[in-house]
Image (tube, rainbow, N blue to C red):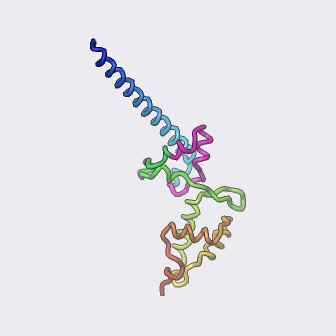
Amino acid sequence: IVKDPETRKFMKENMDSARHLIDNLKRREETMCKVADFILGFHKNEMANGVEEIKSLTIKDISTALNMHPSTITRTVSNKYIEVNDKVVPLKSLLSHGIKKENGEVTSKITIKKKIGAIVGAENKAKPLSDKAVQETLAGEGIVIQRRTVAKYRESLRILPTHLRKKK
């Protein structure tokens, strides 16, 4: 036991600071586990099919369900990774806004981008499909989006425009 009052005060302050740090780390871990459990529980069925087949889930959905502020959820999923089906993926990649199909079902943007990639991948290279043609193909599947949205998603997938994809 330390008898010097200044040393005792110094030790008490540092012990309080250490307890505070440990409590904050525990709280951070609990938040991380709650958010990850919610996301994985929400996508449980899709995980069997692969990460590309996810449903629409937003930060707002999670914050409402877990009764947390959206900024807390944003900080929690930022720069965090999780192993799913032997792949390490960003936790944020499991979130996606959705687009309502004609039948009322919501499809995630990730799924739509995957469909655009498949449509362009299967096209005739001598006569590549225009963004308008891709839009019409998606409309045939009940996914109604604008031509400009198709172009934006195509660019995000690093797929060249029609005139640059044409092969003789």
Foreground residue, 25 or 55? Answer: 25
Q: Is residue 4 above or below residue 20?
A: above
Residue at position x 51%, y 73% from top? Answer: 121
Horizontal side of residue 3 vs 150, given as left or right: left
Give the magenta part as a residue range. 50-74
Quarter occupied by residue 132 = bottom right
Provide residue 28's location: percent of width, then percent of height. 46, 36
Specify the principal SS of the magenta part.
helix
Provide residue 139's location: percent of width, then percent of height. 67, 69
Provide residue 125's location: percent of width, then percent of height. 51, 81
Provide residue 17's location: percent of width, then percent of height. 38, 27
Task: Tell whether position 37 is magenta.
Answer: no
Residue at position x 50%, y 72% from top? Answer: 159
Task: Tell whether position 71 is magenta.
Answer: yes
Foreground residue, 51 or 69? Answer: 69
Q: Is residue 1 above or below residue 17?
A: above
Residue at position x 60%, y 57% from top? Answer: 108
Q: Quadrant of the N terminus?
A: top left
Residue at position x 61%, y 71% from top? Answer: 148
Residue extending farthest bottom: 168
Quarter occupied by residue 128 = bottom right
